[in-house]
Amino acid sequence: MLTPFNNEKEDSPNHAAMKEASRYVDRLWRQRDARWGMCLGKEIFSQLSAWSQQHFNVSLNAYGILRTISKDELNPELKAVVEQIEAGEEICIFRDGNKSKDQKV
């Protein structure tokens, strides 16, 4: 997918953007939490499920995991959304744990 960008001439804007993006990803990739944040959760879950099936003959599914996880194991933003759903409240976007009623989902 990135081959056309990698083949760009060095003085092209695309080449410069790819180099900058590559440096950015490389910097984040060194941090474990940042690595997880760069990946799509659905893709991670799919790969993990395939791995567990292949190595342990164990099927993973989202509902099974959700039944076993506690709210204390969730990150603060997700925990707040779950609590809003439980309370029947409107779901709001959170930044640093603060509700923002003007940014409803």
Image: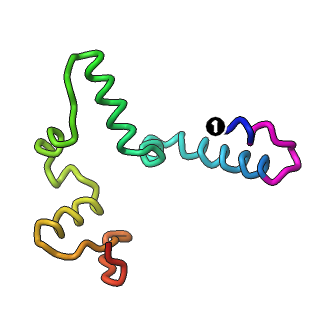
Q: Is residue 75 above or below residue 51?
A: below
Q: Which residue is mark 1?
A: 1
Within-10-Å neighbours for mark 1: few <14, some 14–19, many 20+:
few
Q: Position of residue 105 (x, y in %)?
A: 32, 72
Q: Which of the pair 17/59 is nearer the observer?
A: 59
Pick the front one: 103 or 69: 103
Q: Residues in magenta?
A: 5-13
SS state under label 1: loop
**Residue 75 higher or lower than 18, as above or below:** below
Q: Position of residue 94 (x, y in %)?
A: 34, 71
Percent position of residue 86, x then y = 11, 66
Q: Is residue 80 above or below residue 17?
A: below
At x 14%, y 38%, the residue is 64
Three-letter amino acid code of the residue under disc 1: Met
Q: Is residue 34 above or below residue 49?
A: below
Q: Residue at x 22, y 76 (%)?
A: 90
